[in-house]
Structures are given as structure tokens and as C-alpha cells.
Amino acid sequence: MWLGQPSSVTKMVLERLDAELSETDDQGRLRTYGKVGGVAVVGNEDGAHHTIAEVQQALNEVGFTCPAAGATYWVGEALHKTDYVDARPKPDTTGRTTAALALNSAHLARLLADRPYPPPGTRDAGTGPSSQSA
């Protein structure tokens, strides 16, 4: 995060992910469907919620699924030079939120692996490997 906005590196990654919109699997789904995207923001200023909102929406636009509690952040005091790695003591809330992000991301990834999104044009949301008899 820089100046309350996603950093230029973040924006460059999102721009590159935009190219994924033209890539599909053999059933017509975006290749990013079934992929889980979480957001971690660090910085020395305010704007974490704004940055999370922008990045999560961009991930969603290119086909990623964001889990519940799919973001975590830490921002130091404005105009200070302390980075998270150097911060003492570490905020408990940041640790708990980061753990929830990891847990929920892994859980969602397992669910999507078992029950992928249906291909375009499918009328039955129950279509997929788990709903077919063995």
C-alpha cells in the first residue's frame, strides 16, 4: 500500500491477471475459477480497507473467489518508519485475522476442488464431480 492505494506492484500484478480473462478451460470456465484469492496489506499509513476493497474486487473480476474474512492488514503510524517485521509487540488482532484468512482460504480451496463451479450455460448448480454417481 502506498498513499492509501494499492502499490504500483500490486496494480501491475492485477493488470497482468487481466490477461486471464481470455483464457478458459476445456469447459469454457475462466482458468482462475476455483482459485482462492486472499489479500494481505501492510503499510505505514491509513487506507487498508480501501486497498482491500480494490484488490478483492479486482480478483473477483478476473475469476478468483475470496473467502469469508478474506483479508488481513497492519498499518503503522502515519509518517513513521516502523515496518511490521520490526513492530514490537505484534498486534494480536493482526495475528488472529491472518490465521482466519489462511484457515478460510484453505477451507474454500478444498470445497472448490471437490465442487468446481459449473461450466457456462449449465442450468443445474449441482453439476460436477461430487453430484455425479460413482
Image: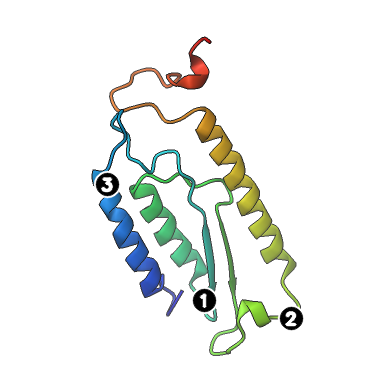
Callout 1 secondary element: loop
The answer to whether 98 appears left or right of 12 in the picture is right
| Relative depth, front residue between 15 and 6 | 15
Between 86 and 24, the one nearer to me in the picture = 24
Separation (CA) of disc 2 from disc 3: 42 Å
Real-space Cα distance between discs 3 and 1? Answer: 32 Å
Residue 71 on image: x %, y %: 55, 57
Q: Secondary structure at mark 3?
A: helix
Residue 50: where, in percent of width, then height? 45, 66
Residue contact between numbered discs 2 and 3, judged by CB atoms under 8 Å: no
Q: Tell me the residue that label 2 is attached to.
A: 88
> Dot 1 corresponds to which residue?
46
Amino acid type at mark 2: Arg
Mark carried by residue 32: none
- Give whichever of discs 1 and 2 has the lower sequence position: 1
Residue at which label 3 appears: 21
Give amino acid for label 1: Asp
Separation of residues labelled 1 and 2 (CA atoms)? 19 Å
- The three-letter code of the residue at mark 3 reads Leu
Residue drawn at the location 44% of the way across and 55% of the way down: 56
Q: Secondary structure at mark 2?
A: loop
133 lies above or below 8: above
Q: At 38% from the left edge and 44% from the top edge, which residue is drawn?
A: 32
Q: Nearer the viewer, mark 2 or mark 3?
A: 3
Give 130 or 46, whichever is nearer the viewer.
130
Pick out the residue farthest to the left. Answer: 22
